[in-house]
Every structure is written in C-alpha cells, then in structure tokens.
Image (cartoon, helix red, strand yellow):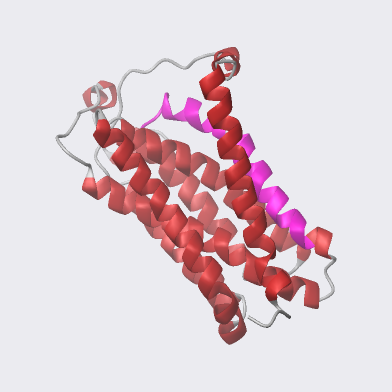
C-alpha cells in the first residue's frame, strides 16, 4: 500500500492533488475497465445459480452468495474511505480490484465453499475499489466534471453487469464455469494493475472519526440518498441473482 514501492519521492508523497482541465480520461478508462469486470462477475452470478441448484445445492445456500457479496461490500466502505485519506487512492483502488479478481476467479469452482468465498471477496474488493476509484477521479476534477467522471465509472460497472446478465447463461452453457470466471477475473485484474500506473491524485486529507461518518447520515438528504441507493442497488443485485433460475422454464 505504501507509495515507496512505486518509486515516488517524499516530496511526491506530500504533494497536493493536481487538478486537470476536463475529464481524466486515462483514469476513467483504466478504473472503468476494472469496474466493468466487476459488473461481469456480479451480473454473471445469476447464470451460476441454476448450475448450483442442479448440482444439489439448496436454493437458500446458492442465494447466500449474494448475501456474502452485499455484506462484504457494506463492511468495506468505511475502511476504504479511511484508506484513501492515508494512501494514494489509486493504490487503494488497485488493492480492491486485485482482491476482487481473486474472488471472480474462484467462481470457476461450484463448491459451496468456493462460491461463498468468491462472492465475499468480490464484495470486499468492490467496496474498496468503488470508493477509491470515485475518490481518485474526484480529486482530479472540479465542478460538473467530477459528477461526469464518477458517473462514467458507475456506468462501467452497470454496463458490465448488463453484459454478464445477458451473456452469462449462454457462456455457462457453452463453456461451463471456468472460462467465464477467468475472463471476468482477467478484466478486473487488468484494471487493478493499470491503476498502479496512474498519476497521483492525492492531497492532505484528515482521517475523520467513525462518529463523523455516522453524524453525516443524520442529515435528511444524506440519509435519503443512502437508503435509496441501498434499496435500488440491493434489488438490482438480488434480481440479477435469480433471473436465470426463474426464467429457465419460461417460454421466453
């Protein structure tokens, strides 16, 4: 996690963030690639569920994979934000993406232990990577460019989720679980490795107390946004988990 490993000087480590005119296209491309890969493995899990159920895994256990993913993401968010205030956000994003890549690769196995470990690691990695990626581009932009850059990163994940959702059943039917799992893991890992080569986007930010995070949620707008995001994202992921199983026998 230390930036000493990247060959930066002590002066670099304390240098303030540099704001660029316009969008940080390279950062969006690199981090967006990793988030696209995350979308692939999250969206593709719905196609794995029928394989698990057909193999004798109880439906509630198969669904627990999604619970592990959501729990992992929830647990990772606060530590991830604190890490981005101590270390370069690109390094934190790389850590999250590489952790998620390991989780994505584990989905090649359909044992219960491997599936639960896979989803938990993907959740943890995504929680870290999302926060760090948004922070990285946020420190490189100002005004409307910040919302645009962060929105494009979110769109990368959503696009990957849609591709995984649509292509997952055919990919699993044709190749089994190995090739799709490896493919999504490689895309995530490419984003993670590329993140380490991004330019610095850091400044002297203090690390707030845990109570400060909780107090922020008491504001009506923040609480409303948090609950709305949790509800919509949770529904999206849960619906994506079961769609292939529910439509398996439907005449569509």
Quarter the C terminus occupies: bottom right
Q: Residue furthest bottom?
A: 174
In the rendered view, would you say 250 is above or below 73?
A: below
Q: Residue at 42% of width from left, 24% of height from top?
A: 85
Q: Is residue 208 magenta?
A: no
* 189 lies left or right of 119: left
Q: Residue at 40% of width from left, 33% of height from top?
A: 2
- Residue 218 in percent (x, y) is at 59, 16
The chief SS type of the magenta part is: helix
* 58 lies left or right of 215: right
Q: Which residues are magenta?
A: 62-88
Q: Residue at 34% of width from left, 48% of height from top?
A: 152
Q: Is residue 64 magenta?
A: yes
* 171 lies left or right of 133: right
In the rendered view, would you say 68 is above or below 55?
A: above
Quarter the N terminus occupies: top left
In the rendered view, would you say 40 is above or below 204?
A: below
Q: Is residue 151 visible?
A: yes
Q: Residue at 55% of width from left, 79% of height from top?
A: 171
Question: For this rendering, which residue is in front, 234 or 41?
Answer: 234
- Residue 64 in percent (x, y) is at 76, 54
């Amino acid at each position: 996690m230390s930036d000493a490993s990247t060959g930066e000087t002590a002066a670099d480590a304390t240098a303030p963030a540099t704001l660029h005119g316009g969008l940080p296209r390279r950062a969006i491309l690199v981090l967006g690639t990793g988030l696209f890969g995350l979308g692939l493995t999250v969206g593709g899990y719905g196609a794995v569920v029928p394989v698990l159920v057909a193999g004798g895994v109880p439906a509630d256990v198969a669904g627990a994979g999604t619970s592990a993913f959501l729990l992992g993401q929830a647990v990772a968010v606060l530590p991830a934000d604190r890490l981005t205030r101590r270390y370069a956000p690109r390094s934190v994003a790389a850590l999250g993406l590489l952790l998620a890549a390991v989780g994505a690769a584990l989905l090649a196995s359909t044992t219960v232990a491997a599936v639960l470990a896979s989803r938990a690691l993907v959740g943890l990695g995504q929680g870290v990577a999302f926060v760090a990626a948004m922070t990285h581009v946020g420190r490189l932009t100002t005004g409307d460019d910040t919302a645009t850059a962060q929105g494009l990163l979110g769109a990368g994940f959503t696009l990957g989720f849609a591709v995984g959702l649509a292509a997952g059943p055919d990919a699993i039917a044709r190749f089994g679980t190995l090739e799709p799992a490896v493919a999504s893991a490689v895309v995530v890992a490419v984003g993670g490795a590329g993140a380490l080569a991004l330019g610095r986007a850091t400044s002297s930010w203090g690390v707030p107390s845990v109570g400060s995070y909780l107090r922020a949620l008491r504001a009506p707008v923040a609480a409303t946004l948090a609950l709305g995001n949790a509800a919509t994202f949770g529904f999206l992921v849960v619906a994506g988990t079961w769609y292939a199983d529910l439509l398996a026998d439907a005449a569509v």
